[in-house]
Amino acid sequence: MIRYIDELQLTGKRTFIRVDFNVPLEGRRVTDDTRIREALPTIRRALELGGKVILASHLGRPKGADPKLSLEPVAQRLAELLGPKHEVILADDCIGDGVKKQVKELKEGQVVVLENLRFHKEEEANDETFSRELAALADVYVNDAFGTAHRAHASTAGMVPYVKEKAAGLLMKKEIEYLGGVLKTPEKPFVAILGGSKVSDKIKVIESLLPKVDALLVGGAMAYTFLKAQGVEVGKSRVEEDKLSLATRLMDAAHRLKTPIVLPVDHIVGTELTDKSPAQETPDNAVPKDMMGLDIGPKTRALFTQHIRDARTVVWNGPMGLFEVAKFAEGTRSVATAMANNKEAITVIGGGDSAAAVEQMGLADQLSHVSTGGGASLEFLEGRELPGIKALETR
């Protein structure tokens, strides 16, 4: 069982919230504040409940204390988003006597942001001493960083046993409810869509979902490994040669389960992975020998749209093609649009490039849930136990 922040009494309690503020920076400016905005409901709830709020996050992959990866610009943006009622204080470290003093002196409505956790190598090493130092700052531990829940680090797992109370934040709650619902109690028909470049990245997800779904739609570069395994000409398309027999085994397993793996029946092909490449449609599922598949074609878009339109649960991870280039983005756009148009279904995006695509296309708010986790979402959909969620369980 996991408790959530709204079940706690926080008045006067030092409330340590692990957030995911790993945002892109350009110099000293946050260029995409989505992850900061996603954390606001939990931060505001903790403040409303009278908690002394301490926020902790990593940023990038610093080697030691790198000023370029300070959380200072993040703290500034957070202050702007929270507004004048709440003062945001940036600590000069995440452990030590100075930080303890700042936390002790926190006044109502103030928020302290700890400096980048990864300035200490002990964070990723899940070092016990470091974990205990973090825990010494807190009466209550709240994890709202789903994107890091698949990592057993000091701030996501190691410190939790040393804090009196623990709970999940509101964003973490949403992730667990939507992704957990997809795996445990999906309304039927249940359709999963997988794309991206490699079958090897999605093997465990396919194995986990095949017994649960009514159809599995496969696009992106990974489709060409499946097509080649069936003897289809794929030209110069990206293929994982060492995964051909695996693709055959997965298709055999799907056949035994009577679950269709739906592959592209036509493609948009080109000569290179840039916007300089010409784009042309193929008449069928074969790719010309001197070309590579860079998107699903119009017949496949219609076929996938039909499956999505008839579904009551849809989960999607991985683009249908080279969506960063406009002429090869239509497949990804068509899947996103079909999901947005199906108002009867629970529609879930499993993080990563798919999440970036729906945000870019302005469709994110028309879907039931867009996961904030890339690797964490994939591992959750694989049915794996995530250390950051496991640590929150009370029994």
Image (spheres, rainbow, N blue to C red):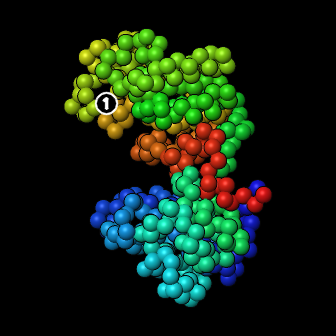
Q: Residue drawn 67% across and 79% down?
A: 13
Give coordinates of residue 28: x percent, y percent. 32, 68
Q: Mark 1 — residue?
A: 327
Residue 350 in view: yes
Of residues 318 and 92, which is closer to you in this image? 92
In the picture, residue 134 is in which quadrant? bottom right
Q: Residue drawn 57% across and 30% down?
A: 206
Give coordinates of residue 139: x percent, y percent. 67, 77
| In this view, 302 is above or below 276 | above
In the picture, residue 48 is in which quadrant? bottom right
- Does residue 25 appear left or right of residue 392 in this picture? left
- Looking at the rendered image, the quarter that the C terminus falls into is bottom right
Three-letter code for the amino acid on which mark 1 is drawn: Lys
Give coordinates of residue 300: x percent, y percent. 46, 20
| In this view, 209 is above or below 29 | above
Residue 311 in view: no
